[in-house]
Amino acid sequence: MRRLYLILEISKTHLLSKKKQTIVAALGVTFGISMFIIMMGFMTGLNDLLDGLVLNRTPHIQIYNKIEASEYQPAVLLDDDRVNFIHSVKPKRRLERVHNAMPIMAELSNDRRVKGVTPQAMCKVFYLAGSNNLNGIINGIEVDEEMRLFNFKDYIVAGDANSIEKKKNSILLGAGIAKKLSLTVGDRLQVSGTAGNTYSLTIGGIFQSGMADVDDVQSFVSLKMAQQILGVGGSYISRIHVKLYNIEDAVPLSKQIEQLYDVKALDIKTANAQFETGSDIRTLISYAVSITLLIVAGFGIYNILNMFIYEKMNDIAILNATGFTGDDVMYIFIMQALIIGMIGGASGIGLGYLVSVFIDGIPFNTEALPTIKTYPINYDPKFYFTAVIFALVSTFLAGYLPARKAQKLDPVDIIRGQ
């Protein structure tokens, strides 16, 4: 224990005797650690932001009626020796609604994996603006459930999301459509269904998803109003959206739904595979750049400790002459590297956190991202933990090679060289 104390004291003395070099080495670790924390916090925060724009509004499972050609035609199934040539087979005509939607929703609601189920009735319409007819889609929704499960209220940039429930002929108009038609909350809008029936709707709110292609066509009304525009009954449901407690259950549950109910069930991983790929690549780039910074800092420590050895030749000879072994000398230089790593790591964590907080407070307002007010930062503790571990490992490795060199020095050769 006393020998360890002596090694620590000697290490501190060596470091304090060369304060400028020690500070430079520690600063290298500090900036490496802080940049790692800042970049990982910002990049993963950005990933969460970009994915959230889509994933927060995307159900974990979408259930709808699948329209496709039969895999086997009756002529093919005929058991005879004739050769059958079938060309341009058209799919069987099926309604767009989900058959037995209500019983399916009831069963899914009782599933322990399911957080909530919401129905939708989608209708294609024309937005009438003078002599202009703009193509659009109106989704009939249960707005209370949409707000509970999919953060729907966050995307209402003007007006009241509940207006479509309070007033039957109210509509939450897409921001792109509102801009094109110069409409705002309280104005009236004429829409025409595919059957030619025209309805006058009051704009109760403006919806903005942040995706121009969606905001230019999509609007929302109550489920009953959409069914009225379609001219169908109250049981007509064109899509069922399912939110799960665990997104990992989406793939197996979607396959189970398809087998049980003869519907198409699209899971979120299949629908948004490109977003996960983009997030993984951005995260990988962030780790690569940040680790490179820490490695560069490690080389700086290596060079400085190498210089320490040449400058402390006499000290090494004296230590050996007074009873310190080669291992003790090696531990002294490794201890110096670890002290630099701990000081640099602690200050790097503090600097990284402060800069992250500063970035998090910078205003970031854009029409494309209505729910975002400041730059996104992720304060995940694992980034701070990873940074400290890597700082200690890199500084240990940077100090190990010079320490091995110091261990092998012969005090007689040192004195003879003097």
Image: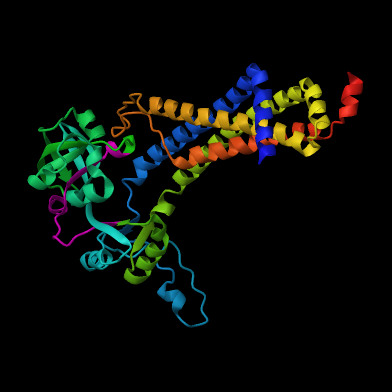
Q: Is residue 291 visible?
A: yes
Q: Residue 310 appears at what percent x and percent y?
A: 79, 22
Q: Residue 105 appears at what percent x and percent y?
A: 24, 64
Q: Is residue 123 visible?
A: no
Residue 277 placement, left or right of 130:
right
On whether residue 335 falls in the magenta region, the answer is no
- Residue at image position (23%, 56%) is 118
- Residue at image position (45%, 64%) is 87
Which of these two is toward me, 392 or 189? 392
What residue occupies the far right of the structure in this picture?
Answer: 416
- Residue at image position (36%, 46%) is 55
> Which quadrant is the N terminus positioned in?
top right
Residue 240 versus residue 343 in the image, above or below: below
Which quadrant would residue 97 be assigned to in this image?
bottom left
Residue 299 placement, left or right of 351:
right
Which quadrant would residue 151 be assigned to in this image?
top left
Residue 371 versus residue 351 in the image, above or below: below
On whether residue 215 falls in the magenta region, the answer is yes
- Residue at image position (40%, 42%) is 51
Which of these two is toward me, 103 or 149? 149
> Which quadrant is the C terminus positioned in?
top right
Q: Which residues are magenta?
A: 214-242
What residue occupies the far left of the structure in this picture?
Answer: 167
Q: Residue 80 appears at what percent x and percent y?
A: 49, 83
Q: Residue 9 appears at what percent x and percent y?
A: 65, 29
Number of numbered callouts drawn = 0
